[in-house]
Each structure stands twice: as C-alpha cells, then as structure tokens.
Image (spheres, coloured by chain):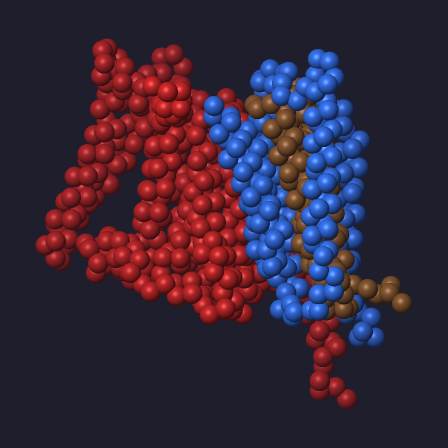
Chain colours: A red, B brown, C blue
Amino acid sequence: MNPTTQAILHFLVTWWVELVCGVVIVAVVPLVAGYVVLVERKLMADMQARLGPMRVGPHGLLQPIADAVKLLIKEDIIPDNADKLIFWLAPVISMTAALTSMGAIYFGPNFEVARDINIGILFVVGVSSLGLLGIVLGGWASNSHYSIIGAMRSTAQLVSYETAAGLAIVSALLLSGTLSIREIVVAQYSSGVWFVFLAPVAFFIYLVASIAETNRAPFDLPEAESELVAGYMTEYSGFRWALYFLGEYANMIVVGSVATTLFLGGWLRPFPNWTGGPALHRVVEVGWDLVPVVFIGLIGVYCIYRAGKQPVPIQTWFMWAVGLACFVVAAIYAVPTVLVAMHAAGVAGSLSALVLPGLNGAFWFLLKVAGYIYVFMWLRFTLPRYRFDQLMHIGWYILIPLAIVNVLAVGVAMLLENQLGRWLAMVVTTAFTLATALYLVRLNDKRTASASSAAAVTTDSYAG
Amino acid sequence: MMSPAHYLFLSLALFVIGCIGVITRRNVIVVLMSIELILNAVNINLVMFSRVFGDVAGQVFALFIIADAAAEAAVGLGIIIAFFRNRETVLADEMDLLKW
Amino acid sequence: MLDSILFYFFGGVAVLSAALMVTRRNAMHSAVFLITTLLATAGIFLQLRAEFLFIAQIILYVGGIMVLFIFVIMLVRLDVPLHHIRFRLQKFVAVLVALALGLEVVAILYSARQLPGQGLFVTGSAPADALAPNSQKLGESLFSSYLLPFEIASVLLLVAMVGAVVMAKSKKGTDES
C-alpha cells in the first residue's frame, strides 16, 4: 500500500480515541444542553410553586426533543439588508467556540478528550472567549437597532468580566503552579484540600464573573425579553437561534467545568487524601467508592416510591423505568467496586481496577458541575436584574480591584507559608481581601449616596 | 517541522499581501488591519527561527510584538474615532486637512 | 507527514484569507477574513510547537484586537457613496511595487544558496524538544533575561490605554460650560 494510505492509517490508529471523543462531544453536548434547559424550566417551576412542562412525554421529558424538532422545521428568515455571510457565520462561531473548549477538559484521572494539553486551562478560557465574536458579529449582521445595541452591551459586559475571571483563575494557578488541567487537580490532591478552601474569594469572584460571562441573570440585561426584545438574538429564528441558545448552555457547562477543575477539586472526592491510616485504609476506600452506588440507588428507590402515586398510568410506568435505569447505573458502579474491594484476580478484576477510577472521577466531576449549574439557576430565579451601568460598575470598580488584591494576597500567603503555616497564612490574607472588598463596597455606597444627594440638592424644582 | 524556506515564503506572502493592503485601500481601518497582517508575518518568521535554533528569545520577541500591536491598534483606532467625529469620514482620500 | 499537512492547510488558509481581506469592499468582511488569517497564524504557531504563543495569539489578537476593530467598524459605519475615483492606476502600480518587493526578497533568499554550508532547504538544526515546557521556558526568560522589556511593555500598554481613552472621549465637558 502506498505511503499516503499508510500515513492515513497510522494517523487514525494513533488518534482514534480523540476523534471519537470529538464526535461524541459534537453529537451529545447539544442534547445534554437541551436537557439542561428542561432541568432549568422544571427548577424554575418548582421554585415558583408550579409544575413546569408536563405535557410532552412523561413529566415533560420529551420537551427538548419537541423544541428541537420545532426549531428545525421553522422557516429560515434572513432580514432584508442583513449581511448574509456574517449572518450565517455568527451562530456557528458561538457554538464552535463552546464545543471546542470542551475538548481539553478532564472528567476523570485518565478520562479526557484531547491528550494532556500543556496549556490546558488557558486553552479552555481562550477558546471560550471566542464566543464573544459570535455575539458581536451576530448583532451587527442582523441590521436591526435592538440587535446592535444588545450586541454592544453584551460584548462590553463579557469583556469587562473576562478580566476579573482571568485574575481569579490566576489566583488558583498560583496555588497549583501549572497550567495543565491534570496537574492542577493533582496539585489539589497533593495539598489534600480543594483550592476553594484556600482561596474562597477567588472562587466567589470567578462565580460572579462566570455568571456575567454566560449572560445569565442577574447579568442578563443584553438578552432580557422585557428590555431589548432578545438583544443580539432578535432577528435569529429557527435553527440559528437554537445554535445560539445551545451555545450559551454549552458555555455554562464549560464554565462550570473550569470552576470545578480549578477550585472544587476536579474529579477528586471530598477529603481526597484521607486514607484513614493503614488499618482503616481499605474501609475508607471502599466506603468512598460506594457513595456513587448509594446515591444513584437512592434516586432509584425514590422514583419507585413515587411511582405508585402518579395520577396517570403512563407516568407510573415511566417512573418505574427511570427507577430501574437508576438501578442499572448503580449496578454499573457497584460491580467494579465489589470486584476491586475483594481484590479479584483475572480479567474482570484488572478491568474493574482500570475502569473504576474513571467512573468514580466522572461521577464526582459531574456532580460538582451540576451543583455549580444549580447555583447559576438558583440565582437566576431569585435575584432581580442589574441595570447596565450598575453591571459595568460592579465589573470594573469592585470585581477587578478585588481580583487584583486577591492575586497579591494569595502570592503573599504562599510566601508566608513557611513561617505561619499554610492555613494561618491563607486565613490572614483572606481576611485582608475581605476587608478590601468591604472597603470597595463602602466606597460604592458613598458614591451613590453622594450622587443622589447632589442630585437632590441641585434639582430642587420647587425652590424659590 | 518543515524546512525554514517554507515558513519564509509563507511569511513573505503574508507580508506582501499586507503591503498591498496598506498601499491600495482607501478605508484607513482596513489599512490598520493590513498593518496587523504585516506584524503577523514577522511573528511567523520569529517563531520559526526560535524553533530552528532552540532559543526561546524569538517567542519572547513575538509576544512583545503582539502586545505592541495591541497598543498600536488601540491608539490608532482612537485617532480614527476622533477624526471621524470631526470630519465624518474614514477614507484616506478625504483626510486632507493639510492641503492648501 | 502530519507536520506538512498541517503547514499546508494553515498556510493556505492564511494566504487565501489575507488575499480576500485586502480585496473586500465591505470593511466588516475584511475584519472577518483577518480573523481567519489570525487563527491560521495561530495554527502555524501550534505546528511550530509554540503552544503558549498559539493561545496568546487567540486570546490577545482575535479575542481582543479584532473585537476592538469590529467595534470601531460598527461605530464609523457609513454607506460609502461612490466618490469620484481620481487616479485609477494606483492599485495596479501598488500591486506591482509590492510584488517587486517580494521578488527582491526571494532573490536574496535564493542567493543565500551560494554561501558555503548554508542553504534554504535544510531542516531545523535544533531537536524537536528543545523548547518542550514551552510556557515554563517562556515565563522563565520573560522574568529573568527580558525583565526590562517586560516592564517597558507594561508601561507602554498603560500609556496606550490612557491615550486611546483620551483620544476617543467626546469633549462633552467643555461644551456644557
């Protein structure tokens, strides 16, 4: 066979895992994002004392599929004087940026899409910041006032909060000393504690900045319905709008993954270093390995418990099906756990030992990302929206100075580690950063108080 | 890596296209973008030579060029905005305030 | 083999989109094609094993400078009326001059072949792993040998930021008084 075919085959043999993972990401993530939308609607309904989508499929579970089909068969409208090339290109850029940045994320100890990228975290942050271009080009190409204003506001917001997010990431990188994602989690393992306990202010800054980065409430002025119709997405309908929307939710998953990797310990279980000494070592390991089994098993038990109380037969069968599916997943977790716990030999034993860390890691990682996204949704349903100038004020006047002070504080803490011990150094510097935060907020209050009192003084229209 | 000649020709092609853009276009924003293209061509050369000699100085220099290009683009675009506010034009032909 | 495929792909995209960039009538299209050129250049950096520069190019150039350009193009957008084009031969002469420049450089590169022991088509003399932990080496040299240029670059960026804000600010204060 000629060298070209040989070279192609060699390429495929070396890189087939990455190619398959890439295809899986592009195929699966939009579906997952669709179901995240359903979860959000159900959660919103729950917090508002109602039921949410219940009609389409049992308990509304086929709602995302119905939405997808509806969006696909809608007429593709392009506004009159819109720039066709850029109108087509903008949602593609948004979605591509979100999906590509997922390529560097580690779900478990050896469970990743691309091989270990030297610059892992920087790659994820940098490529996901390309989504900005999708927003600004989409707003401009729509040739409509609402779109351009919405795009400019959204871009200004994203750019402002990107700096704060980057500085918060720098604080965590100071603690880990490397950019590679695998090494960051390994650093958290060797320091025995998640970085969120060592740098809580950085985690808070990153939380707020990532809410603003993904255009979520309370920072969602650019795309709020009562403000600018739909901001930069106004003129997009059908599948193009679906791409934007799914890109936004995929971005949420990416941002959650970055926060989990940097601050929440990635794929590590809580207390990752605690092995209980040589006596209890096996008990502790097996105990932690059983947590996913128990967790998913309890969900299954709850589903079957509720199955008897459903009003409609199809919902009863559905609850039974979900319960049994949970038991199947729990069994998938239980079998390797039991085999490894009994030190089983042979093919089954070694296969279990190979697969179990990845399974466990994926469970903890997805649990943490789900928790982070739950906090996003919780804040969306609870807090009112910030006005745009308030938003920019928070970004530039409060978050960025706080992030800079935090970087300095973490650096100083690392220098003082040897003298004061790690925990005392971190507590002292965190206290200092919180004092700065309070000072900045007090400055803000004084500024708004003086501005409103000055306005009250000068605009006294009934004087004289 | 390929031989240095390949990268030299690629960088030369980008440089020449950038020069054509600077000389030919009337819209000064496109002229500024062509200048960015020229800087990128130089960056490719620098990084290629840093790889050939195993010295990281080329990449450091390329990083400084990127930072410098950012500063220059910001100031240049500020000037264009100020000029646009006065004269309502961005075409190089019409920026003839010094003409007598 | 993979190296040459990547080089030809990224190089082809870079040259093609650069050519498209300087020929588009619409400034926004030019900006979009410059974005593709910059991404292709980033790919060339990656192919040369300079991964930190790859991501720095994407974050700074594409995510920063090009967004700035796009904002300004949106702000100064005029439907350019067809002005009286005075000197039509300018484009032709310009292209000729630029190609002459290119040919001169090619001539210089080829004449280097006459020098003993050197030549154009030799492969790289350093081993592939000389720059292996790329970010680490870059950071080390930035903060040790090149510390002064680093500090000067930060002052330069500060000055440019202040200058750009001052230039682009509208003179509202003087009008009101």
In the rendered image, residue A167, in percent from the top left (x then y), is placed at 62, 41
Q: Tell me which residue sits at (71%, 27%) in the image.
A: C109
In the rendered image, residue A406, in percent from the top left (x then y), is placed at 64, 39
Height in image: B44 above or below A304?
A: above
Residue extending farthest to the right is B100
Number of numbered labels in the structure image: 0
Q: Quadrant of residue C113?
A: top right
Residue A254 is at least partly visible in this image? yes
Which quarter of the figure is the C terminus of chain A placed in?
bottom right
Q: Is residue A376 left or right of residue C97?
A: left
Q: Quadrant of residue A290?
A: top left
Q: Tell me which residue sits at (36%, 63%) in the image.
A: A76
Residue A283 is at least partly visible in this image? no
Q: Tell me which residue sits at (54%, 51%) in the image.
A: A132
In the rendered image, residue A352, in percent from the top left (x then y), is placed at 27, 20
Q: Is residue A342 left or right of residue A216?
A: left
Q: Tell me which residue sits at (48%, 57%) in the image.
A: A85
